[in-house]
Image (cartoon, coloured by chain):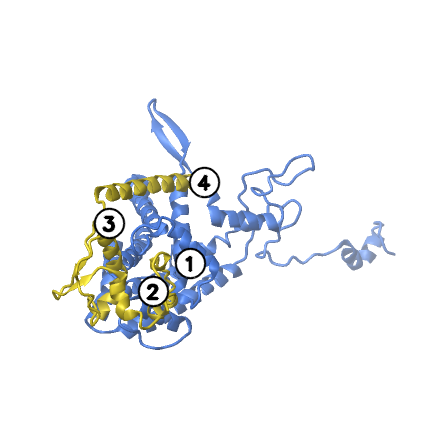
Chain colours: A yellow, B blue
């Protein structure tokens, strides 16, 4: 009983705390979408294959936060070239294989939240 | 404080071995395939050996420790769980002990107050810490099934999702990761803070705690900080559970540290206090029924007694008894 009670109280507190944190951020920055003229370069990846395999979820998370919440939509890669911070930048190349995301994610039993909002390559013709 | 720092040093050295072995010597096959098989063999073999060894030991007396009214006359209410008289309730008593640590819930603490007065009070922290630690470890082990099974069953998937309930950070933060670190820290500090606990603690108490902490830290940093490519990890694990001998792919060194420490824990397990996981089921003070008045408990140590009945005695001495004019049953 004590454990269940503690868990509930803790979760309620943490939830409130997180709600507050998110609310502050959104009020600060009324995100205004300005379409920068960055050519969507899809001839090469933004980083090495090894780095992307282990870190792609972090890159996408950072992109989501800075692009949607702060309106910063340009990504400067380590080799100096610029990319638009968009899932489409990745998909421009990677959607050619419709199972590109799903193969590994099914295998490793990881369910990404991308497709809660975005259309996945499986859902687009 | 040698008994604290020696285990700490041992765990540090153990964590360093796979780092050197894989990063510099390139012994990925040894640490990724050979050692896990060896560790599993030692764990299963050792665990089985000790359990069978204990099961073969005779239990001379009926010695359940009870804390309730035993089965008596019909109008006296029996405390069936605390003083079980049937196998079912004895089994329920063992299971509730294993799952909820009921005996730790009764933990008391003696404290000196002004006066001086010695007072005993309820102390639930060890119960709460121990319960949190063991349940978290269980959930974490079950969660790891996603590396060992091609398809994770729905029940385990649900458990995983419940553990990611807060849905913060990326990859999603697991509640049990924080809980297991908090409780294991408490379990270490409990032994260090109190002088009485310090005296009775041994290196064998600190070593498994430090080893588990090291495993947790390696695992957590692999998930949240220093990323490791999951694909070859799953390939290696599927290969291992299918008894294959394929060499592992390119995996970060931190994974080998994690795996090596788990192997060390598995090898250490049958030789250590960690065997309490199996022994709790065999504890005679807990798994026996309190029915010594209803059912005779025969001591297997007693040698067979040779009885001599009266009729045998009379057969031997009948003639002499008749001469002495003593009454006999049979003429």
Label 2 residue SS: helix
Residue A69 appears in the figure? yes
Q: CA distance from mark 2 to mark 3?
A: 45 Å
Q: Is residue B56 above or below residue B134?
A: below
Residues at badges 2 and 3 in contact (C-beta under 8 Å)?
A: no
Judging by the rendered image, the residue that carries numbered circle 2 is B263
Q: Is residue B148 left or right of residue B284?
A: left
**Disc 1/disc 4 C-alpha distance (Å):** 26 Å
> Quarter-wise, where is residue B43 in the image?
bottom left
Alpha-carbon span between mark 3 and mark 1? 37 Å
Find residue A76 and name its label: none
Subunit ID for the residue under disc 3: A
**Residues packed near mark 1 inside 10 Å, few (<14), some (14 to 19) or many (20 plus):** some
Foreground residue among B236 and A113: A113
Task: Look at the picture and state if B168 lies above or below A12.
Answer: below
> Disc 4 designates what residue?
B105
Q: Which residue is mark 1?
A: B142
* Discs 1 and 4 carry the same chain letter: yes
* Element assignment for label 1: helix
Choose mark 2 or mark 1, whichever is in front.
1
> Badge 2 local density, few (<14 within 10 Å), some, or many (20+)?
many
Write down the quadrant of residue B199 in the picture: top left
Q: Residue at x 22, y 54 (%)?
A: A67
Q: Which mark is residue A69?
A: 3
């Amino acid at each position: 009983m004590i454990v269940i009670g503690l868990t509930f109280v803790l979760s309620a507190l943490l939830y409130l705390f997180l709600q507050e944190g998110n609310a502050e951020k959104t009020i600060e920055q009324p995100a205004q979408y300005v379409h920068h003229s960055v050519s969507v370069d899809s001839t090469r990846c933004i980083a090495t294959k090894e780095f992307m395999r282990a870190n792609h979820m972090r890159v996408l998370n950072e992109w989501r936060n800075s692009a949607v919440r702060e309106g910063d939509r340009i990504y400067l890669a380590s080799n100096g070239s610029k990319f638009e911070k968009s899932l489409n930048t990745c998909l421009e190349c990677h959607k050619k294989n419709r199972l590109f995301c799903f193969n590994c994610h099914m295998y490793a039993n990881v369910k990404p939240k991308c497709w809660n909002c975005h259309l996945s390559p499986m859902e687009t013709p | 404080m040698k008994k604290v720092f020696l285990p700490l040093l041992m765990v540090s050295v153990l964590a360093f071995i796979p780092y050197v072995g894989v990063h510099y010597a390139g012994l990925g096959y040894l640490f990724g395939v050979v050692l896990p098989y060896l560790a599993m063999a030692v764990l299963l073999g050792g665990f089985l050996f000790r359990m069978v060894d204990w099961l073969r030991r005779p239990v001379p007396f009926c010695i359940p420790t009870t804390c309730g009214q035993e089965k008596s006359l019909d109008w006296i209410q029996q405390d069936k769980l605390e003083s079980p008289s049937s196998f079912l309730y004895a089994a329920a008593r063992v299971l509730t002990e294993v799952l909820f640590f009921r005996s730790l819930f009764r933990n008391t603490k003696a404290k000196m107050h002004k006066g001086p007065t010695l007072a005993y009070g309820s102390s639930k922290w060890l119960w709460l810490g121990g319960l949190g630690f063991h349940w978290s470890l269980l959930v974490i082990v079950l969660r790891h099934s996603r590396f060992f099974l091609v398809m994770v069953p729905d029940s385990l998937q649900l458990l995983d999702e419940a553990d990611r309930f807060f849905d913060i950070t990326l990859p999603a933060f697991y509640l049990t990761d924080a809980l297991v670190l908090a409780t294991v820290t408490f379990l270490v500090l409990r032994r260090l803070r109190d002088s009485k606990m310090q005296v009775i603690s041994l290196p064998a108490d600190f070593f498994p705690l430090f080893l588990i902490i090291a495993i947790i830290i390696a695992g957590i940093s692999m998930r949240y900080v220093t990323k490791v490519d999951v694909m070859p990890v799953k390939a290696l694990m599927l290969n291992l559970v299918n008894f294959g001998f394929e060499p592992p792919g390119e995996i970060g060194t931190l994974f080998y540290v994690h795996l090596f420490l788990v192997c060390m824990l598995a090898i250490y397990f049958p030789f250590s206090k960690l065997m309490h996981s199996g022994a709790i089921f065999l504890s005679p003070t807990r798994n026996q029924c309190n029915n010594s008045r209803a059912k005779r408990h025969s001591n297997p140590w007693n040698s067979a007694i040779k009885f001599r009945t009266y009729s045998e005695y009379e057969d031997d001495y009948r003639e002499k008894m008749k001469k002495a004019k003593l009454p006999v049953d049979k003429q």
